[in-house]
Image (cartoon, rainbow, N blue to C red):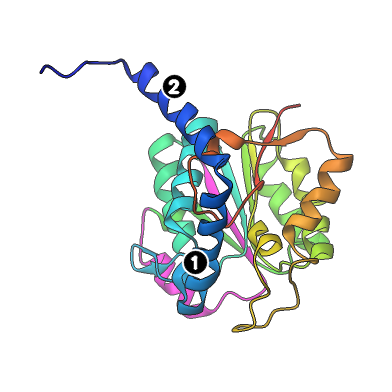
Amino acid sequence: MQKKIISKKKFLEINISSAKKMSKNKQLKKDSLKVISEADKFRWIHQATWLGEPILNLPHDMFAIQEIIWKSRPEYIIEIGVAWGGSLLFQSMLIDHLGGKKIIGVDIFLPNDLKKRLNSHNKLAKKIKLIEGSSTDEKTIKSIKKIVKNSKKVLVILDSHHSEDHVLEELKIYSNFVKKGNYLICGDTIINFIPEQKHRPRPWGPKNNPHTALTKFLKKNKRFRADKNIENKLLFTCNPDGFLEAIK
């Protein structure tokens, strides 16, 4: 029997419809949250690497970020929370291919050995600008503004300290960099939906986390909405409701 040929447009329409149905399967979503919660005891989200550097994120979420970068074509990406630098390298490859200008990585601690490893990537390293300091410090913000200037093509990824107060302040500050059609990604909102991680205690938990901050932020800021077409297809994600598109 000859296979029926369909267009790419039709193929994607079927995918979007199927993903939407999957997102409404409550048992499946419950099971996926349980998998993430249990697997975290074995450092699942810490296992992936990019060009040899730990990426500290689920591959599903990195593919979502790739889709967002492809769709919005940012000139600049501001990543708050550098860790081991794998995600900086991942993003630098993408914007290099798409003609973007800089990845700005902000962290309170940027060890010399990390800088050395990133610089070893030559061409990609030229796309990366590191800023050591608090994401909410005025000096840090001024440094970022000096780089991005008046660009209307900025993607922001928030993935540092996950307490509600800190994330809410970051959302208020960094949302101003994101213009219509671009994205702000609020990381680790999953903390709100899983049991407290007793295997690695943190100063945040189910009632004090990025999602509770995001909820408060969206009540007052109507410029953003969660892009459910991105989230629906993932099943496994650390960022439920956190892929925000600027609509105004």
Instruction: Say which element carries label 1.
Output: loop
Residue appearing at x 42%, y 44% in the figure: 94
Dots 1, 2 in contact, CB < 8 A: no
Taking depth in this image into account, of 95 and 49 the one nearest to the observer is 49
Q: Quadrant of residue 204?
A: bottom right
Residue appearing at x 75%, y 64% in the figure: 209
- Would you name the residue on which mark 1 appears? 56
Which range of residues does the magenta coloring cover?
Answer: 101-123
Residue 210 horizontal side relative to residue 23, left or right: right
The span from disc 1 to disc 2 (Cα, nearest Å) is: 31 Å
How many residues crowd around disc 1 within 10 Å: few (fewer than 14), some, or many (20 or more)? many
Instruction: Say which quadrant the N terminus sits in.
Output: top left
115 falls in the magenta region:
yes
User: Which dot, 1 or 2, sits closer to the camera?
Assistant: 2
Residue 104 horizontal side relative to residue 90, left or right: right
Q: Is residue 243 above or below residue 2?
A: below
In the current view of this chain or complex, which residue is farthest to the left?
1
Q: Quadrant of residue 33?
A: bottom right
| Mark 1: amino acid | Leu
In the rendered image, is residue 137 in sight? no
Q: Find residue 13 and name its label.
A: 2
Image location (x, y in percent) of residue 118 = 43, 66
Residue appearing at x 80%, y 66% in the figure: 207
Image location (x, y in percent) of residue 144 = 69, 52
* Disc nearer the start of the sequence (1/2): 2
Q: Is residue 236 above or below residue 75?
A: below
Residue 48 horizontal side relative to residue 222, left or right: left
Instruction: Say which quadrant the C terminus sits in.
Output: top right
In the current view of this chain or complex, which residue is farthest to the front?
27
Instruction: Say which element carries label 2.
Output: helix
| Mark 2: amino acid | Glu
Image location (x, y in percent) of residue 230 = 54, 38
